[in-house]
Amino acid sequence: MTAPASPPPPRPLATTVAAALGAALLLVALLLPLATRAILGDDTYWLQVLIWVMFFAYLSAAWNLIGGFAGQYSIGHAGLVGIGAYTSSVLAIQAGLTPWLGMLVGGALAALVGGVIGYPCFRLRGTFFSLVTIAFAEMLRVGLELTDRLGPIEINGVRGLLLPVLGDRPWMFQFTSKRPYYYAMLALLLAVLAAGWAVKRSRLGYYLAAIRDDEDAVAALGINPARVKLVAMMLSSFFAALGGTFYAQLVGFITPTRTMSLDFSVQMVIMAVLGGIGTVLGPLWGAMVLIPIAELTRAFWGGSLQGVHLIVYGVLLVLVILYWPQGIDPWVRRGVDALARGCERWRAAPPSAVSVENAPRIALPADGLLGARLSRNGAGPLLSVRGLSRSFGGAVGVRDVSLDIAPGEVVGIIGANGAGKTTLFNLITGALAPDGGEIQFDGRRLARESPDARNRLGIARTFQIVRPFVGMTTIENTMVAALPRAASVAEARREAARYLEFVGLAHRLDVPAGGLSTGERKRLELARALATRPRLLLLDEVTGGVDQRSLPGLVRLIQKVKGEGLTLLVIEHNLRVISAVADRLVMLHLGQKIQEGLPAAVVSDPEVVQIYVGGSGTKR
Amino acid sequence: MRSFWQATVSGLLIGGIYALIALGLNIVFGTMRVVNFAQGALLMAGMFMAYWLWELGGVHPYLSPLVTVPLLFGLGYLIQRACVSPLLARERAREPMSVLLVTLGLALVLENAALLFFSADFKTVQTDVSLATFKVGGIIVSVPRLVGMGAMIATCLGLYLFFTRTDLGRAVRATGQDREVARLMGIDDARIYGFAYALSAALMGVAAAVLVPFFYVHPALGTSFLLKVFVIVVLGGIGSMPGAALGGLIVGVVEGIVGLYIQASAAQIVLFAVFIGVLFLRPAGLLGVERQ
């Protein structure tokens, strides 16, 4: 898209090695059918096994788009496969439409259905999605088993549909040899893997990875998690349905029982988990291991012991999740890296010395770095809270709190644990709905706006307990926040780097967020919040849990943010810190505002001192 | 009209057994926030135990809980400690979704192992009560189903007393509400989780005992029950004990009535429509409390 500002770093050798291996693998896949014919003569069985490996890798990769990338475990993808198989088959039988086009119709229908069943769940937790998908697939199966005709269309219930045999008719997706099916499957597999690869690199991929780690934190960055998951689900459903059409054409016979079984859905999950859940190629590795196992058990025990391979699958699923949650993919990566190192030594080239420290410094603009949207709609306070109340069962969270914050002002909120500080934040950001009262932001009354909608209006927050997306690096974390406003992923990366430089993490860009210290995580969270370009920033205990030595740095950082003209609402326990940054202090006690004024005055107020030092505030 | 009431009563009675299974699922969900996909497989295991006790030892199914309940309790505890507990520790900060996959794997193993060892034949236990019925106001009441209903009511009552009157029961509830705070109060959450899972598994021994006299025993049976139970818990409110009981009865009655007027298995489709409707309109379920 946009040209990068600095010259791109030299391509690491590992990438070249991986590309070479991938090309080799593809070449093998392309030539394999010719080789089996030369060696085996009648190779129908072997081709069939290879087709099954690719078929399951394909379906599992389709599942992985929502299950792995977003961590939303569908256990009903067989239902979507069934929709594809039935749609294209019915269209072919009734209207003579070629399955090549019918598969697109089926895909679109499945995407629609996937969206309809997914959407209500995506506002809820992941568990619901799993329950709903499994129920959907099973009931669809039972429904089809019971239905002999849908209006004028015969679907034959449990007996299923037999596709008329047409001989070699490429246009009708029918071939007498297995070989064309092999290549069709290979093309489909490449398509779904390419889609996964593209998604991973796109803004959608960043959002999905972040959602997988912490959905609430994603919403706080102005991204609607439900919508992101919906897109992934629809994409995943589309591909799953194409697989269904392929199955129907390959086997020539579909029944609800065979095409939509629960075991089928579960197998897609298992392949992806074993191969490496959420990775692009994981499903391929999983299928390459598991399908041969299934074939071997079938060869040993024949059809009499049909469930043996499923026992193996189940045991593997349990063991992998417990002891080896990353699956096979990291091994492959390590193998590629080792190979690359080997090549390096062989070439005797000096190691490429582009570390983050020597990377060209990003030039900081002299002013307006934060790009804060300082323009206003009206005069008056930026945030105005009137009579806000919220209780939890019988317990008071916040009672009748009113508060005004002028643009550019820094207001500190102090109070003992349980005083209602974080509840107030949750009400302002929309994470909680108030029982009563009113919130106005820049002259606009906030009613039912979700946290992500409020972030887009310009309210950003950090969390009391930091919530980095632990599966991502520091810069990727910040990119998630910058992406909604960036024209491209590359631009978001540059933006993110600027904000990280601003908070003093320029040397930690490519470190996994899980490896940051508490102080660094606080800085990261600040960078993330700033990257959403807020007008009002709510900071929840920036210094909580941070060691003494890091305190002065964090205080300077908050002052630096203030210097950019941003309006801040800061919760802080440390009175010295808050007095140093705030223009005004508000004291909450048992959910009510009991004091407000200049920091020096509030801090020395006898009631405040008594609550803070005397500790009677916790008794009542 | 008589057949309508007949269908309602029959549905209500089978609904009691659904409710019993849903209670088991909800005990685990209520404490650990995870759905146990192995719940159905544990029921199936309980039914096979009861079947073999009858077949080999001549033990009446109604006495089988004396054996199956301790066995399933132990099995449940073992599963929790070996497979679930490590994951709960690992995914402390987020929704422990991998537990769902692990229990799915366990269900797959149990179900296919049963298929391997006991074959896919439908097994039945013919006891003196199996076909016993009596008539009330012209409506036929099946004795074993009535016993099932009685077991559900007794279990509900017992669980209610346990959760409200005993220290252990209160500790389980407290851990379900806020694990961290419960820990601070000196509750050993790991032990509580193990206990809750074991209790939920043990309940399947009770459900199995009342089912076996009038229901076939089959390896895939657990899964077919579990799917209905998913509808029940979403309908009633996930984690809600009264919701499980109410949802179970509703599903039983809907099944009975739709089965009467349309077709036995068409009930599944009606139930699914209800299920989707509830999800759209009231995702927390009929008796569920919306959690923040």
Image: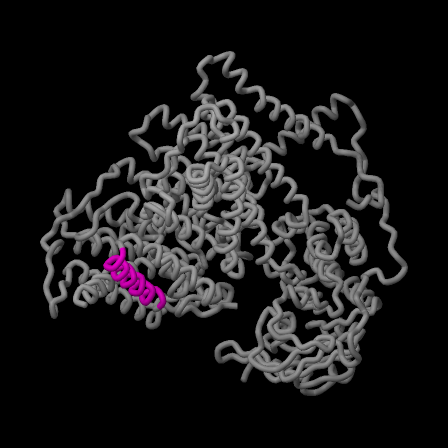
Q: Is residue A602 magenta?
A: no
Residue B56 in sight in this render: yes
Q: Is residue B91 above or below residue A295?
A: below
Residue A273 lies, in percent from the top left, at 51, 41
Nearest the viewer among A259 and A206 is A259
How is the protein colored in the picture?
one colour
Prevailing SS of the magenta stretch: helix
Q: Residue at x 24, y 57 (%)?
A: B206
Nearest the viewer among B91 and A298 is A298
In the image: residue A600, left or right of residue A327: right
Nearest the viewer among A565 and B55 is A565
In the image: residue B42, left or right of residue A204: left
Q: Is residue B120 above or below residue B188?
A: above
Nearest the viewer among A208 and B89 is A208
Identify the image quadrant of the N terminus of chain B.
bottom left
In the image: residue B259, left or right of residue A212: left
Magenta segment range? B243-262
Q: Residue at x 37, y 34 (%)?
A: A162
Residue A317 in sight in this render: no
Q: Is residue B247 magenta?
A: yes
Residue A65 lies, in percent from the top left, at 56, 45
Q: Is residue B89 above or below residue A310?
A: below
Q: Residue at x 90, y 59 (%)?
A: A366
**Quarter holding residue B35:** bottom left
Residue B109 lies, in percent from the top left, at 36, 41
Residue A88 lies, in percent from the top left, at 47, 40
